[in-house]
Amino acid sequence: MIELLHRIKVFVYRLDGSEPDYLLLKPDQGIEALWGPLQGDLGFGEKLETAIRRRVMTETGMTPPGQVVDLEMPGRWTLGDEEIIEWTFGFHSITQPDEDRLQKHWAEYRWAAFSEAYPSLGFDNDRAAIMRLHTYLGAA
């Protein structure tokens, strides 16, 4: 029997200057850790926007929550007996992250301009998502 899992990926961005900066995160998995967006599971019966706001507040301390952008790029694949559906969003940060929370949840983190963020991402689907978000923001 295949188990269906829903996951979210959230590209947090800020608009301080003429171009957006993106928050890149690296989990604590040694040399194999890859830079990427905020990500996690969707709780049972939880709505997507609620999960996004909860994850951003819990892991970065950013409050009040900013605008959520649906990148309309769901991904779907099977891994063993699990079928994974991944929902990808942008999140406009209007406050600064809590450095202590970031250090607690991530091995490394940094803000990066698109020209640095795009090649830093470890997966093709993440690069496609940040490209779509960057284009949506009118910065491309």
Image: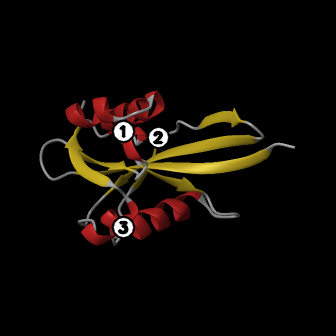
Residue that label 3 marks: 104
Check disc 1 and report its element: helix, strand or loop: helix
The kind of secondary structure element at disc 2 is: loop
Q: Is residue 36 visible?
A: no
Disc 2 crowd rating (10 Å Cα; few below 14, some 14-19, many 20+) is some
Residue 40 position within the rendered picture, expressed as x and y whole percent measured from the top left: 53, 55
**Measuring 41% from the left and 63% from the top, which residue is drawn there?**
56
Residue drawn at x 34%, y 69% is 101
The amino acid beneath tag 3 is Lys
Disc 2 residue type? Answer: Leu
Task: Work out whether mark 3 precedes mark 2 in sequence or the reverse, and give the earlier one.
Answer: 2
Which of the image's four quarters has the C terminus? top left
In the image, 135 versus 124, the foreground residue is 124
Q: Are marks 2 and 1 in contact (CB under 8 Å)?
A: yes
How far apart are the alpha carbons under marks 3 and 2?
28 Å
- The residue carrying mark 1 is 133
Q: Nearer the viewer, mark 3 or mark 1?
A: 3
Image depth: mark 3 or mark 2 in front: 3
Q: Is residue 16 above or below residue 57?
A: above
Q: CA distance from mark 3 to mark 1?
A: 27 Å
The label number, if any, that marks residue 71 in the structure image: 2
